[in-house]
Image: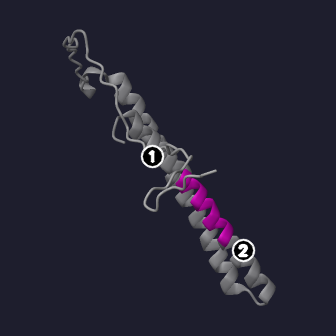
Amino acid sequence: MKMTRPRAGEVTTSRRKLKTPPAVALWRPEIVLASSISMPVRRTVALAEPSTRPEALGSQLGAAQSVLASLDEARATLGAVAADARTHAADAATTRERVTATFAAYRAEAALDDVLTGAWRRVSALMEERGLR
């Protein structure tokens, strides 16, 4: 029995090539055309000047004066506390008294920080109400 051998340059393979998906997929946008284009209705908005709305201006001025008054009260109160702490620190004979005076000064600074933070929030709200922020 005679068997045929493949020739030297000829290779027979029974393998099939596999298709591999590409590593990068390109974006393909869908284009949608408008059926009709119309101009939007033009509206004119005019802001009223403070002279035309005195009640709004009056309430804003009242709020600003309230913030300033609270800052003035805090200045007077905290100034007295700071002066008292300085006096206690100067007159202190022991380390304990000096530490107590230092704590009083720190408490006054913390109170000042609280007052300033509250005033900042109130002023920021007033500015936002007027459209300045």
Extreme-front residue of the structure: 1
Instruction: Name the image quarter holding residue 32.
Output: top left
Q: Amino acid at mark 1?
A: Pro
Q: Which mark is residue 62?
A: none
Q: Residue at x 39, y 40 (%)?
A: 127
Q: Position of residue 35 (x, y in %)?
A: 25, 9
Residue range corresponding to the magenta coloring: 106-117
Disc assigned to residue 22: 1
Direction from residue 42 to residue 8 in the image, left or right: right
Q: Residue at x 26, y 14 (%)?
A: 34
Residue ID for mark 2: 103
Mark 1: few/some/many CA within 10 Å (<14, 14-19, 20+): few
In the rendered image, the vertical position of residue 94 relative to residue 83, given as above or below:
below
Disc nearest the viewer among 2 and 1: 1
Question: Image check: 61 left or right of 47?
Answer: right
Query: Left of 35 or right of it: where is 129?
Result: right
Dot 2 lies on which element? Answer: helix
Of labels 2 and 1, earlier in sequence is: 1
For the residues labelled 2 and 1, the Cα–Cα distance comes to 71 Å
Q: Is residue 126 left or right of residue 5?
A: left
Q: Is residue 116 magenta?
A: yes
Residue at (59% x, 52% y) in the render: 3
Q: Secondary structure at mark 1?
A: loop
Tell me residue 94's x, y (percent): 79, 89
Magenta stretch mostly in which secondary structure? helix
How many badges with numbers are in the image? Answer: 2
